[in-house]
Each structure stands twice: as C-alpha cells, then as structure tokens.
Amino acid sequence: MFSLNIFFETLLGISQNKSLCRILQNFYSKKITVHGNVIEFGATPNSNKNFIHIMKKKKIERIFYSDKHIKNKDIINVDLNKNISIKKNFFNTVLLFNVLEHITDAENAKNQISKILKKNGLLIGSSPFLYRFHAAPSDYLRFTKPYFNQLFNKSFKIIKIENVGFGPFCVCFSMISDFTRKIPFLNYFLFTFAFLLDYILSKFVSYDLKDIYPIAVFFNVKKK
C-alpha cells in the first residue's frame, strides 16, 4: 500500500472530503470487474456514492439496488437479518459495502446472499474495522479478516480477503479527520505526516502494519 500512486490518490480523496476508509475501499473497488445481473445492498439508484459506479463493467444485464429503510419501486426493500424474497440463483454479482456492521446476524445475511447468487457468482464488499461509530440507523459490529475467512469458508471460494490501511498513524488520522478537515488544507499535511511515519515504522517490523491496524477489511468471494 505504500506507493506514490495510492498516496496521491488518497490526497485527491481528501480534497473531495471523503473518509480514509472510503478512499481505500474505492481504491480496491476500481480494480473489480462485474458482469451480468448485479445488486448493490445499502444503495439507492440516484446516489453518487454507490460502489457500482466506479467498478469496471462487462456485459451488464441489469443493476439492482436494495435498502431496507427505503420503500420505492426502484429499490428492493429487504432486511438481511431475515429471510429475503428475491429470486434464487439470479445474480452474478452481489455488492455488500459498509452494510454488515449495521446487521445483527451476519451468518443469516451470508446465507441469504448465497441463495440469490448463481453458482460461481461473486460477493464483493468491505466492512470498516478501526473506524468511528456511524449509525444507519445503528452500528452494531466490527469484523476481522479471520472472521470473514471463517464466515465464507464453507459455501464460498475465497478469492481475496484483505485488510485495508497503512498503520497506526494513519488510523489516528482517520479518527480525527472529521474534525481537522474543517481547517483548510490541514488534512493534507496530517495525512502526509501519518503516511510517512507509517512507512518508516513498516521498515522496523517484520509484519504488515495494516494486518494489525486495519481501517477496513475487503472481501471478494465466489459461490461454490
């Protein structure tokens, strides 16, 4: 993660008032190609924040959106804590970004998603870890990389489950950036300083710092 490309991309995201969590999730998402029938949970058709917008697309049939809090003819209104009434084995790709932390039963959510995915269909998403409480309408859980490995192990083939971040100094930046961004240009300097400190620290440890201080966890798994 310590590259000039991600450094300058992060500075661009900071200029757009995006959180460090979202910037890094975008960085991973832009590398993903989706196809066929796609559904993004926790998303609405007219939002410019949907992850589907920044992903590569190939032979898309239709894109669906789902949000349990909104009842609208263009939005599939279901609750992943419960059994959902969506056609089985229909979707080629399910996007699940920043949703699981707002659900109390991740195991059930995984099972419901597995039912609506075609064989070899992809489940792609991310959930924050070292990140502030954010109610929508509430915030319940944080998940680790080992938890996701265990959650998806039986019914999915794991393509990638990866911690997202740089190290402890960038975590500190992430925690205070909501406040410091109110002072023009301050977050540019704070992130640069945190990034450099994490880079220096990474040279003195034998492990990957983001595996100990993840801002989020990204997952890409395929239904067996």
Image: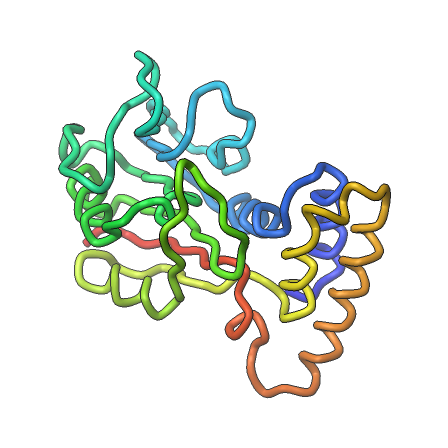
Q: In the visual, does 92 lie left or right of 125?
A: left
Looking at the picture, tell me which residue is in the foreground, 106 or 115: 106
Q: Position of residue 32 (x, y in %)?
A: 47, 45
Q: Residue at x 76, y 73 (%)?
A: 197
Based on the displayed image, in which of its 4 quarters is residue 149 positioned?
Answer: bottom left
Quarter of the figure that contains the C terminus? bottom left
Q: Is residue 211 above or below residue 122?
A: below
Residue name at image x 28 percent, y 37 percent:
92
- Number of numbered labels in the structure image: 0
Query: In x, y percent, where is residue 61?
Result: 33, 24
What colouring style does the render use?
rainbow
- Position of residue 221 relative to residue 184, above or below, is below
Q: Quadrant of the N terminus?
A: bottom right
Q: Residue furthest top?
A: 73
Name which quarter of the figure residue 141 lies in: bottom left
Q: Percent from the top left, x then y, of residue 119?
A: 19, 45
x and y percentages locating residue 45 in the rendered image: 44, 20
Relative to 132, does residue 45 appear above or below in the rendering?
Answer: above
Residue 137 shown left or right of residue 149 in the figure? right
Residue shown at the point (54%, 56%) measured from the top left: 131
Q: Is residue 128 left or right of residue 115?
A: right
As drawn, 49 above or below 32: above
Q: Nearer the viewer, residue 97 or 93?
A: 97
Query: Which of the 4 image quarters holds residue 143?
Result: bottom left
Residue at image point 32% right, 47% down:
123
In the rendered structure, the answer to whether residue 196 lies left or right of residue 45 reads right
